[in-house]
Amino acid sequence: MVRAKVWILKAHFDGFPKQSDFELKETELPPLKNGEVLLEAVFLSVDPYLRLTAYFALSEICQLKPGEIIMINAAAGAVGTVAGQLAKLKGCKVVGCAGSDEKVAFLKKLGFDEVFNYKTVGSLAEALKKASPEGYDCYFDNVGGKFSTVVLDQMKKFGRIAVCGIISLYNDKEPQQGPYIQWPILMKELRMEGFFVHRWENRKEEGLTALLKLVAEGKLKCPEHITEGFDNMPAAFMGMLKGENTGKAIVKV
């Protein structure tokens, strides 16, 4: 019989996840049936983020056009890094933000036009204004919360917002209280739309083919943040929620 390690969710998260919420166990796998095969996992993902996500959100929701200006938060993550590079290939000005100076430098190497560390700027509104005094045509939102409130005030008329994630809200015990967003949406006639990439499941091959072509041509880089060891799965997961990863968060077992 083959034995395998498994991580069990021991307790539902109360606020931010803790190591004690997880339990590592060993289990005995059932015998293989006729026609079945046993595979060994080498790399595992600790987040749901798919690069297929940036491709369709930019084309279908943002409807990005050459010469436009886009703001991407959590830009050093799996989706943000790809969204920024695709926007540049489209001929747009790309502004991004991240949570460390190392990530800022990394994003500049990827070709982002303007990048700032949101944790060290004195004023988020001033940092956004400095990066693009004329405002923003598109906003690729991975964070939500107070950050988005500030960005909405700097959107251009008829701007488009693609809501990809709300990582600043996922682990709140109590819902955050914020200002109403209807005023800037109405006065600037903005379009704001949330989405899950599974909406375009029937076009998956299209997205993969286009992205793989760009990778093969050296026009698209796909950074990965690899944590060694299956036993470190919860730590990698919690690190991803804290923004410790650059690119896709992966565990090498």
Image: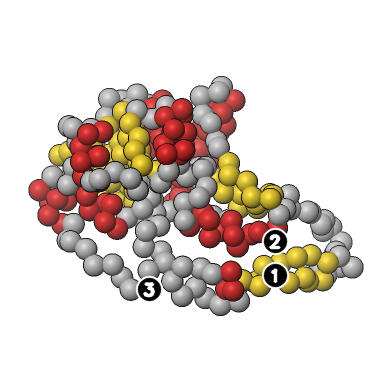
> Label 3 amino acid?
Lys
State the residue in front, 189 or 70. 70
* Residue sitting at x 31%, y 70%: 175
> Label 2 amino acid?
Asp
What residue would you read off at disc 1?
24
Q: Earlier in the sequence, mark 3 or mark 2?
A: 3
Q: Residue furthest right?
A: 1
Say if 63 sits above or below 21 in the image: above
* Residue sitting at x 39%, y 54%: 165
Q: Is residue 186 left or right of residue 28?
A: left
The answer to whether the residues at label 3 and label 2 have Cβ atoms under 8 Å apart is: no
* Residue sitting at x 37%, y 58%: 168
What residue would you read off at disc 2?
231
The answer to whether the residues at label 3 and label 1 have Cβ atoms under 8 Å apart is: no
Mark 1 secondary-structure assignment: strand
What residue would you read off at disc 3?
173
